[in-house]
């Protein structure tokens, strides 16, 4: 389970004295715990889809934070955020490329945006950026 992988990686980062990895893994672990409380189950009862959604949301937050540091001309913080993104990316599935997304949309009979989005959400959830899917789907209409 993804929850256990994050927990083990968090412990390993603690043993390795890797403060940056430990910081981001602790944040994600805490978010897992909060999600478990919100759903009324233990955090270790969350399914991988929930964990994956939390990790992806955290990645987007890191990207926004990194952009802010770039605009503030803080290269040392940009590097820290990039390191944290690299740590989290190990837990994400391989993302589909734009070419793979185009090929999948081309296979669909109904290329209307809501149907394309529904298809990708059902079949490729977590494997592609839905913003990119939306952008490419608009090219087909």
Image: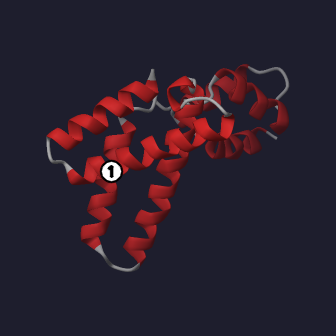
In the picture, measured across the screen, residue 88 lies left or right of residue 102, that is: left
Q: Quadrant of residue 76?
A: bottom left
Residue lying farthest to the left in this orientation: 16
Residue 75 location (% of width, % of height): 27, 71
Residue at image location 19% in from the left, 48% down from the top? 18
Q: What residue is shown at x 46% (from left), y 57% (from top)?
A: 63
Q: Residue at x 83, y 20 (%)?
A: 109
Q: Is residue 78 above or below residue 45?
A: below
- Identify which residue is drawn at 36% across, 44% down: 25
Q: Position of residue 97 (x, y in %)?
A: 51, 34
Q: How many marks?
A: 1
Is residue 4 rendered to the left or right of residue 8?
right
Q: Is residue 53 above or below residue 65?
A: above
Q: Is residue 99 left or right of residue 108?
A: left
Residue 80, quarter of picture:
bottom left
Viewer-closest of 52 and 47: 47
The residue pinned by badge 1 equals 84
> How dense is the environment of label 1, judged by Cα within 10 Å: few (below 14), some, or many (20 and up)?
some
**Residue 106, visible in the rendered structure:** yes
When asked about the image quadrant of residue 28, the answer is top left
Q: Is residue 60 above or below residue 122?
A: below
């Amino acid at each position: 389970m993804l929850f256990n992988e994050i927990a083990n990686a968090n412990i390993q980062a603690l043993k390795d004295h890797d403060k940056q990895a430990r910081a981001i893994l602790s944040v994600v672990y805490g978010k897992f715990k909060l999600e478990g409380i919100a759903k009324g189950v233990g955090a270790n009862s969350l399914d991988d889809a929930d964990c994956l959604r939390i990790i992806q949301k955290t990645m987007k937050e890191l990207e926004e934070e990194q952009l802010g540091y770039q605009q503030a001309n803080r290269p040392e913080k940009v590097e820290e955020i990039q390191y944290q993104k690299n740590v989290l990316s190990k837990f994400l599935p391989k993302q589909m490329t734009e070419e793979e997304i185009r090929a999948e949309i081309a296979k669909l009979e109904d290329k209307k945006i809501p149907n394309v989005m529904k298809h990708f959400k059902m079949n490729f959830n977590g494997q592609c950026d839905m913003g990119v899917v939306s952008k490419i789907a608009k090219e087909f209409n």
